[in-house]
Amino acid sequence: MKYHIVTYGCQMNVHESEKIAGLLRGVGYTEEAPVEEADIVVFNTCCIRENAENHAFGNIGALKKLKRRKKGLLIAVGGCMAQEAGKAALLVKKFPFIDIVFGTHNVAELPALIARKKQEKKVVSLLEDRAETEDGAQAFRTSYPNAWVNITYGCNNFCTYCIVPYVRGREKSRAADRILEEAEALVAAGYKEITLLGQNVNSYRDNDTDFPALLDRVASIPGKFRLRFMTSHPKDFSERLVAVMKKHDKICNLLHLPAQSGSSRILSLMNRRYTREQYLADVALFKKEIPDGEITTDLIVGFPTETEADFEETLSLVREADFSSAFTFIYSPRTGTKAATMDGQIPEEVSKERIARLIEQVNENTRRKSEKYVGKTIEILCEDYDAKKGLYLGREPLGRMGYFKSDKHCVGEFVNLKVTRANGVSLYGDLV
Ligand code: SAH
Ligand code: SF4
Ligand code: F3S
C-alpha cells in the first residue's frame, strides 16, 4: 500500500510528517507515492496564519473527486489546524469525505485510528492532550544529511498574536538523556547536521539541564557534524548560550532570534517581554563574542495599532541589528488570541505597503552581506542535486545555499567552495 503526506507550516511539522511516514510504514504502507496512486493521504496542517489554512482547505477539497473514484482511499487530517477549536467539526462538515481527524498530541495513535476506521463508517476523530514527551514513533527521515530532533513541545508564552500555545499545548521538555541517545544514533548513522527543535529552545529544562547545558552535551558527541537549533526567544537569551556557541566549532554561528517588531510599544502589546533596547543588547553581546556570526529573524507588520512610526522602528531595527535575512509576515488575526479582539486592526493595503518596504530593506541586507562572500572559500554540506540546474547544492554554516558542479556524487559530504557569484541567499562557486 502507498501513502502520500502533505505538510504545511514549520520545521516542527516537517519532522512530524517524518514520524507519520515512519508510523505508516509500520502498518503496511511501504511506499510514498503521488496523490493519485496513494491508498492513504495525510494532511499535516498549520494554522499560524489564515493563508496556511486556506491552502489546506483548497488541497483537501481538491480530493473530492479522487475519493469518489477510488473506493478504500483513506483521507486523514492532522496537525495544528485539526487541533484548533471548532476547526475539526468545520473540516468534517465542509469535507464529509474525510475519514480520520487527529490532533497534535495524537500522531502516534494514527495507526490505531486507521484500524478503527476500517471497522467504523463515520469519521474517526481524536483530539486529546497527552502528557508524555516520548511517543515511540520512529521517524522515517527524508532530509538526509540533515536530521531534526525535538527537544521541547508546546509553548507557554502566549504572544498575543499567536495560536501555537492553543494548538500545541503547554511546554514540555524531553529528557536530556533521550535527546542525547537520539543525536548519538543519528551521528552514528551518518547524519551530518542536527537541528534541535522547539518553539522556544531557550526555555528547555530537564532537572538541572537547561538549554546551554543540553547544547554543550550534544555538541560534545564525537564525529564531524553541524549543530543548529531553533527557535530562540529573545527574552530567554543568555550569556551562557553564547559561551557554549563559542566553545564548540560544531555549533553553527547562526542565531535565529525572532524580533517580531522594532517598536517597544508594539512588543509590549505583543507580550514579547523584551524591549527594542534589550533586543539590541542581545544582538550586541552575540556580535561581540562571535564576530563572524550572523542573526536572522521573524518580523510581523500590521499588528493592531501599528503606526507608521512604529513600522519605521522595525525598518531601522533591520539595519541596526544587521540581520542577514528575515521571514516577514503580515499580521493575521487568529480567533481565540488576544490580539484578534484588539482595537486598531490595520487595513490590508497599509500592511501590504509596509511589508513591501520591509522586504526591500531585508533584501538589501541579504545582498550586501552575501556579496562579501565572493572570492572567499566556504565549507558546504552538500544536501542535494538539482537536475534542472545540473548543480549540486548545500548550505554553508550561516545558512546560505551554495551551488556547484561536481563530477562525483557528493550528497552528505562536506566540500569547499570558492564563491564566484552571489545572488540573494544563493552563492555560486567552484570546488577547491
Ligand atoms: N516560536 C517561534 C515562532 C513560531 S511561529 C518564536 O516564538 O519565535 C513563526 C513565526 O510566525 C513567528 O515568529 C511570527 O513571526 C509569525 N506569526 C505567528 N503568529 C502570527 C500571526 N498571527 N500573524 C502573522 N504572523 C504570525
Ligand atoms: Fe507563538 Fe510566541 Fe510561543 Fe513563538 S513564543 S510559538 S510566537 S506564542
Ligand atoms: Fe508550526 Fe503552524 Fe503549528 S507554524 S506549530 S505548524 S501552527
Image (cartoon, rainbow, N blue to C red):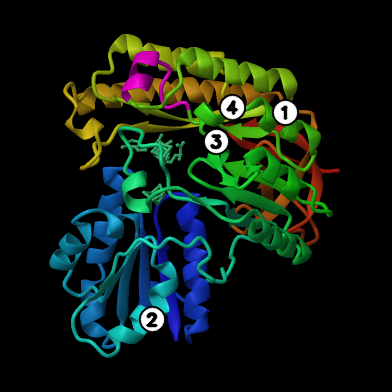
Going by the numbered disc 3, the residue's amino acid type is: Ser
Q: Earlier in the sequence, mark 1 or mark 4?
A: 4
Whole-angstrom CA distance, mark 2 to mark 1, is: 52 Å
Residue 373: numbered disc: 1
Q: Which residue is mark 2?
A: 112
Q: Earlier in the sequence, mark 2 or mark 1?
A: 2
User: Mark 2 against mark 1, which lies toward the viewer?
Assistant: 2
Going by the numbered disc 1, the residue's amino acid type is: Tyr
Whole-angstrom CA distance, mark 1 to mark 3, is: 26 Å
Query: Which of the two residues, 214 or 250, is positioned nearer the viewer here?
Result: 214
Q: Element type at marker 3?
A: loop
Could you say which quadrant of the image residue 344 lies in? top left
Q: Earlier in the sequence, mark 4 or mark 2?
A: 2
> Percent position (x, y) of residue 247?
80, 34
Boundaries of the magenta span? 259-269
Q: Earlier in the sequence, mark 1 or mark 3?
A: 3
Q: Which residue is mark 3?
A: 232
Could you say which quadrant of the image residue 123 lies in? bottom left
Total numbered labels = 4
Whether ligand 1 has any atom under 8 Å from the Cβ at mark 3 is answered as: yes
Going by the numbered disc 2, the residue's amino acid type is: Ala
Q: Earlier in the sequence, mark 3 or mark 2?
A: 2
Q: Which residue is mark 4?
A: 324
Query: Which of the two residues, 371 or 89, is positioned nearer the viewer here?
Result: 89
